[in-house]
Image (cartoon, rainbow, N blue to C red):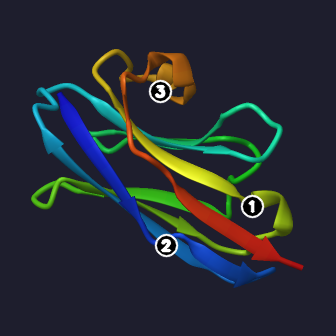
Amino acid sequence: QVQLVESGGGLVQSGESLRLSCAASGRTGSNYSMGWFRQAPGKERESVAAIVWSHGTTYYADSVKGRFAISRDRPANTVSLQMNSLTPEDTAVYYCAATNRAIGFEVLDRDRYDFWGRGTQVTVSS
């Protein structure tokens, strides 16, 4: 089992930045990926960004490319999401997730993920 705890959400104004973090504990295995997903009210959960833990390759949804950056801290076993130039459309609950079933482009597929955090609210006001 893998436990994931997100932190760093909050209320910001349009154009500002926010950094989310996710601490992972438990048995992640040697070959896994971690991702960030988000869900706005009335919408499906969508991918935001993901990173393959072993070699650090990153993947992004088109909607956040150039604005968001995912990174990992291997000794601390944490993954972060730096979000810049936020807009009201980025308002959602952000979830951290982990999987042993995706290490390539499929890391943006939410159905590949077996372990999820409880989420952290990000609200961007106009």
Front residue of this view, candidates 37 and 64? 37
Residues under labels 2 and 3: Cα distance? 21 Å
Does label 1 or label 3 sit earlier along the sequence?
1
Q: In this view, does 49 lie to the left or right of 65?
A: left
Q: Provide residue 27's location: percent of width, then percent of height.
A: 10, 31
In the image, farthest residue toward the right:
126
Which residue position is annotated with label 3? 107
Which residue position is annotated with label 2? 19
Front: mark 2 or 1? 1
Position of the C terminus by quadrant: bottom right
Q: Is residue 86 left or right of residue 50?
A: right
Disc number for residue 91? 1
| Residue 54 visible in image | no
The type of residue carrying mark 2 is Arg
Front residue of this view, candidates 105 and 126? 126
Q: Provide residue 30's location: percent of width, then percent of height.
A: 12, 28
Does label 2 or label 1 sit earlier along the sequence?
2
- Sort mark 2 into few (<14), some (14-19) or many (20+) by Cα contacts within 10 Å: some
Residues under labels 2 and 1: Cα distance? 14 Å
Mark 3 lies on a secondary structure that is helix
Does label 2 or label 3 sit earlier along the sequence?
2
The type of residue carrying mark 1 is Thr
